[in-house]
Image (cartoon, helix red, strand yellow):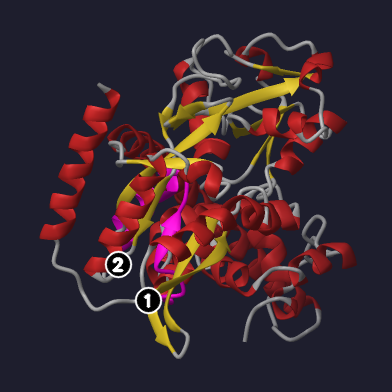
Amino acid sequence: MHRIKLLIRTAVLLALSASILVAPVFAQTTARGNIARVGVLAFRGAMQANIRWQPLIDYLNTSVPEWQFELVPVTLVSAPEKISQQKIDFLITNPGHYVELAQDYGLGALATRERLADGQGLLEYGVAIFSARTNGFGSLDDLKGKRLAAVSPDAFGGFQLAWHEFRQVNIDLYSDFQAIKFMGFPQDAIVAAVKSGDVDAGVVRSGLLENLAQEGRIDLADFVVFQNNSQPEYPYQVSGALYPEWPFTALPGIDKSLRENITLALLATQGAGIQSRYSLRDLWSAPLAYEDVRQLVLAYQTRNNDTAAQTDGRYFYVAMLILVATGAAILLRMVKNGMVQTEPAVPAAVPLENSAVSAQEKARFQSLTKRECEVLVMICKGELSKTIAQNLGISPKTVEYHRANLLQKTKAGTTAHLVQLATRIEGEWRPS
């Protein structure tokens, strides 16, 4: 029955592919022949991405006529830039990232990854919310008021799935925790932070803990995964629901015959002997439906947009108060120095509390990237996240990611304090 369903889905897929009218091809033609670049989300770093995915690239090079494929590791932040600059033609990424990019850039799924685990093909995965066993936590509720490590606000398996699972038990990740430490890729660092006690709990995609244990880097017995009884048939420890595995996606404008040949090659990995002959880590199946993923991401974006609007509104009034207080202080200082005459005389101004900015604080601002500085300039102007996204040509979620990075890098704590510090040392960080 499974094979019959697969054949039906494959026939439907090929019929749909044949009906699509595509724009001019993005892939390059050079003296070496046709080159197609396959981006891969490197959630464990570029080196691990190359080790894991190069066999698939080698397989495509031998299976798709007249085309040469190159592997391009990407991150959540760099992927949209590479798409916009036409530096990749295909992308293998997590489902949350896919549905967001599909909305912005029109990506289409050619196939869904079927991950092999102890001879079993897995078409779904989830999130592992975990802690060191020595902490003695028994449930998600025990994590309230604690410190959590995750990848970034944009990470699907590395944060958003956890946000959804906490929401199911009426816990708000943003308000019910002491701190959330966004550590980026690789996710291995999150496990290390939990192990060392730097944070109380962590969020990673399901299967990573088992991979690290197989590599001899951790002992699974040292950790506890919360709500691990939710998927008894699933071979990895997982917290909550499962979602479709990563899709192999194509950008719009890819040559029709190239799309079809890649699709056929991916589905052919189901054939006997292909996986072992090419040392493939995964098989590929006809694309699953990603509607549940889309709904979760939409709910998360709605929550973030509403919160950002409220935060930006509160910040605007706080910023105005800071500007008024600063202006008053300058005016009083001018009066004191005789630059402005008043009758009767105005007493000396009381200096703003903690007005001096330390060298360490200045150094933190000087370490900001160009993009972070651009976002910070607009934050200081009181622009909403949606407006910042439109002005910089990025998504609102990417703006929120930069906001979180700015607060973390500068250790400002709040947006109001961030603006206060930034305006005091504007000349030492503001881009020209």
Q: Amino acid at mark 1?
A: Ala
Residue 391 lies in quadrant = bottom left
Q: Residue at x 14, y 59 (%)?
A: 18
Q: Is residue 254 left or right of residue 379?
A: left
Q: Is residue 197 visible?
A: no
Query: Where the C terminus falls, by quadrant?
Result: bottom right
Circle 2 packing at 10 Å, graded few (<14), some (14-19), many (20+), is some
Q: Position of residue 59 (x, y in %)?
A: 49, 57
- Asked if the residue at tag 1 contacts the one at tag 2, i.e. Cβ–Cβ closer than 8 Å, the answer is yes
Q: Position of residue 116 (x, y in %)?
A: 53, 33
Looking at the rendered structure, which numbered label has been put on residue 27?
A: 1
Q: How many marks?
A: 2
Q: Position of residue 76 (x, y in %)?
A: 53, 55
- List the residue tagged with mark 2: 258
The boundaries of the magenta stretch are 85-105
Q: Residue at x 80, y 36 (%)?
A: 193
